[in-house]
Amino acid sequence: MRVLLIGSGGREHALAWALSASPLLTKLYAAPGNGGICALAECAPLDVADHPAVAAFCRDQAIDLVVVGPEVPLVAGLVDDLAAAGIRAFGPTRAAAQLEGSKAFTKSLCRDAGIPTADYAAFSEREPALAYLEGRPLPIVVKADGLAAGKGVTVALDHAEAIAAVNAVFAAPGGGSLVIEDFLEGEEASFFALSDGKTVIPLATAQDHKRAFDGDEGPNTGGMGAYSPAPVMTPALIEETMARIVRPTVDALAARGIPYRGVLYAGLMIGAGGPKLIEYNVRFGDPECQVLMMRLKDDLLTLMNATVDGELARTSIRWHDDPALTVVLAARGYPGGYATGSEIGGLERAAAVEGVEIFHAGTKRDGERVLASGGRVLNVTARGRTVAEAQARAYEAVGLIEWPDGFCRRDIGWRAVARERGTDA
Ligand code: AMP
Ligand code: GLY
């Protein structure tokens, strides 16, 4: 099969790595790709937002499957436009991608289908939103309705902060609708499933570290590290999540004439009342995908074909029991301003550490040199018999990377390691 992979992050490098191992693959293209992906795929300088150009490329290169990594092209309807041109693509349609593209859409679907999630109200005008805040318990959560690259959510500890968040949404260009929801208590976990529109099968679980600094302090980021599985997600909780959240969602969409095909990523809060949905994403998580791919035993391309072709009912998935963990190396200053262009050394020695794979998230190649080109730059990923072993291997590899302009958290996986030791977090 000739495959085109859309995206340029660590998630897409991990997908390229897994696709490259497929016996079905004859040629892999990536658009736009990055310095790591280009070692596995031919990187095409395509404008991914130009759907007719992507379709023309697919026809010219006889592409059998397009794999869409990030949410922006999914929400923009790339899969619909490819389908209209007769090109198979892995990922949900524009209508199905509303699960991530509109918080109000998802909350309303959950309410109609009785899916456990925080109580909420949706607003498209400022005054009623401010009025609703009065009398609501604190903390309270204010979310801009559309895609916000992880920046649209405020967990407000007092009313002044909540009012400021509401005002900010209505002041933003193109802003103007939001959801206000109750604060959920508990431990967060990420749950991934594959859906072909009718059948949904669970993938695996993960947890990520969203804050920039050790001890889960500092500003929110796209994710500074992750591990899989999430110890909090017991088999009973996984079954409950499938039965009460994920399957009812796919069924409710199907009842509205929207078959969901692709990866469904449920952000969950595990509290006293069982799992509750925080949000949906319509793609693999980044960096959660990196740890999932390290644990996947089966052929990714076969699974993607089964998803696109509606054949998941006949499919099962095997995983390595060993946990995997990834440490994000980011440019100093991230998630604020940072410099790009500095050289990274030691990658080969680091990748030689047992059980380690290094995925590039924001790099480019300049001849033989690898240069930083983004905020999150490398995902140093390892598998081990325990989370502690995976963690030790990942940090051993981190220690071999020569990049003075980078930083990472030193405590990725702390909660899972503490659980392993029996000193519960
Ligand atoms: P989201 O972009 O919806 O995942 O929100 C970003 C982060 O905000 C989540 O990972 C949670 O840590 C937090 N968050 C969002 N909604 C809630 C909620 N209702 N209760 C508690 N925390 C929340
Ligand atoms: N790591 C969080 C996300 O991919 O949305």
Image (cartoon, helix red, strand yellow):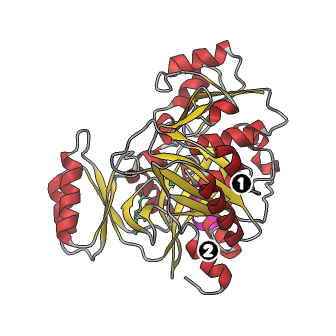
Q: Nearer the viewer, residue 208 or 187?
A: 208
Q: Is residue 354 magenta?
A: no
Taking the spot 58% from the left edge, 39% from the top edge, the residue there is: 69
Q: Nearer the viewer, residue 43 or 317?
A: 43
Q: Marks 2 and 1: which is nearer the front?
A: 1
User: Is the C-beta separation of discs 2 and 1 under 8 Å?
Assistant: no
Which residue corresponds to mark 2? 416
Residue 356: assigned label: 1
Q: Is residue 72 above or below residue 397?
A: above
Residue 305 percent location from the top left of the image:
75, 37
Q: Please name the amino acid that badge 2 sits on.
A: Ala
Question: Relative to 315, is 381 on the left or the right?
Answer: left
Name the image quarter holding residue 196: top right
Magenta stretch, residue numbers: 242-246
Residue 126 percent location from the top left of the image:
17, 53
Name the image quarter holding residue 307: top right
Question: Relative to 226, is 145 on the left or the right?
Answer: left
Residue 425: assigned label: none
Q: Is residue 123 above or below residue 359?
A: below
Residue 160 percent location from the top left of the image:
16, 68
Dot 2 crowding, Cα within 10 Å, few <14, some 14–19, many 20+: many
Dot 1 crowding, Cα within 10 Å, few <14, some 14–19, many 20+: many
Distance from Cα at disc 2 to Cα at disc 1: 19 Å
Residue 304 appears anywhere in the view: no
Question: Relative to 237, is 354 on the left or the right?
Answer: right
Taking the spot 20% from the left edge, 75% from the top edge, the residue there is: 135
- Looking at this rendering, what residue extends furthest in the bottom direction? 423
Disc 1 element: strand
| Count of marks, rendered view | 2
Residue 384 appears anywhere in the view: yes
Question: Relative to 309, is 68 on the left or the right?
Answer: left
